[in-house]
């Protein structure tokens, strides 16, 4: 079992490692991070969007990062799970 604080560190590291060369700077939307059924749900987007909240700067297809707090496993959410993480 990992703490929410440890899970936040895992999420941040996962996002930075997953970033492709040439992609914009990405960041976790910490104000929107939630826990549901033992899963930490961490939305992210471009740093520019998160600073401005200007929808013209928002990146699409940024499925949230999910961390299972019981195992510490981290992965991107899948579109088929949208109802789980959208309503969190």
Image (cartoon, rainbow, N blue to C red):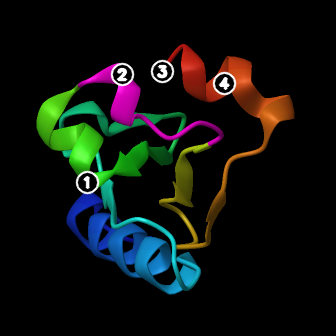
The residues bearing labels 2 and 1 have C-alpha atoms spaced at a distance of 12 Å
Query: Can you identify the residue that label 4 sits on?
Result: 84
Secondary structure at numbered mark 1:
helix
The residues bearing labels 1 and 3 have C-alpha atoms spaced at a distance of 22 Å
The residues bearing labels 2 and 3 have C-alpha atoms spaced at a distance of 21 Å
Q: Position of residue 33 (x, y in %)?
A: 31, 39
The residues bearing labels 2 and 4 have C-alpha atoms spaced at a distance of 24 Å
Closer to viewer: mark 1 or mark 3: 1
Check if mark 4's residue and mark 3's residue have beta carbons within 8 Å: yes
- What residue appears at the point 42 percent right and 79 percent down from the top-left corner? 16
At label 4, counting other C-alpha atoms closer than 10 Å, the crowd grade (few under 14, some 14-19, many 20 or more) is some
Q: Position of residue 74 (x, y in %)?
A: 59, 69
Q: Position of residue 79 (x, y in %)?
A: 80, 34
Mark 2 or 3 closer to N-term? 2
Q: Nearer the viewer, residue 40 or 50?
A: 50
Query: Can you identify the residue that label 1 sits on?
Result: 47
Please tell me whether residue 26 is drawn above or below residue 33 in the rendered image: below
Query: Can you identify the residue that label 3 sits on?
Result: 88
Magenta-highlighted residues? 54-61
The residues bearing labels 4 and 3 have C-alpha atoms spaced at a distance of 7 Å
For residue 79, the mark is none
Check if mark 2's residue and mark 3's residue have beta carbons within 8 Å: no
Query: Can you identify the residue that label 2 sits on?
Result: 55
């Amino acid at each position: 079992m990992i703490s929410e604080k440890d899970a936040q560190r895992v999420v941040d590291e996962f996002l930075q490692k997953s970033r492709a060369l040439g992609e914009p700077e990405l960041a976790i939307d910490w104000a929107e991070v939630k826990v549901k059924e033992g899963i930490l749900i961490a939305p992210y987007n471009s740093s520019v969007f998160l600073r401005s909240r200007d929808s013209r700067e928002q990146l699409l297809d940024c499925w949230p990062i999910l961390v299972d707090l019981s195992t510490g496993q981290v992965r991107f959410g899948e579109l088929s799970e949208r109802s789980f993480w959208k309503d969190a």
